[in-house]
Amino acid sequence: MATYEEIQEQVKISAGYVPKTCWIADVKAQHGLTTREAPNRESSAYRVHPCPAKKKGAIEAAFRHFGLIK
């Protein structure tokens, strides 16, 4: 599985910005790629900083690049 740093670098190359790690975690959770909840997460009921809809596509493209989703 690709690291958060690798995903950030791929998004930077393809889309021109570096996504926040919380955005990556949000998109991973939406695709069922998370295996556990982070111990430093403020609330298990909601995300404090969910991924904006306009940024989701570039993160998903990076996931496809690394073979995490089809």
Image (tube, rainbow, N blue to C red):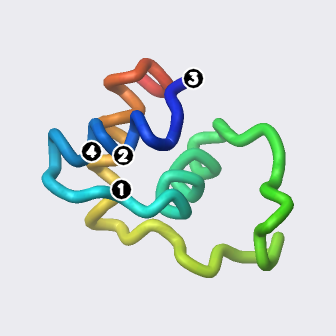
Residue type at mark 4 is Val
Three-letter amino acid code of the residue under disc 3: Met
Q: Residue 42 in the image: state x and y as whole percent.
A: 78, 78
Q: Residue at x 64, y 50 (%)?
A: 29
Q: Quadrant of residue 36?
A: top right
Q: Which mark is residue 56?
A: 1
Distance of label 2 from label 1 (alpha carbons): 13 Å
Residue at point 59% right, 51% down? 30
- Identify the mark at residue 11; answer none if there is no mark: 4
Query: Left of 59 or right of it: where is 50?
Result: right
Nearer-the-camera pick, 49 or 3:
3
Residue under numbered circle 3 = 1
Residue 43: mark in rendering: none
Q: Which residue is mark 2?
A: 8
The numbered mark, 2 or 1, whose residue comes first in the sequence reads: 2
Q: Which is more foreground, mark 2 or mark 1?
A: 2
Work out which residue is located at the far top of the displayed protein and give it.
Answer: 67
> How far apart are the two marked residues, 1 and 3, measured between alpha carbons?
19 Å
The reply to whether the C-beta atoms of the residues labelled 2 and 4 are less than 8 Å apart is yes
Residue 44 x, y percent position in the rendering = 82, 70
Q: Amino acid at mark 1?
A: Lys
Q: CA distance from mark 2 to mark 4?
A: 5 Å
**3D distance between C-alphas at marks 1 and 4:** 10 Å
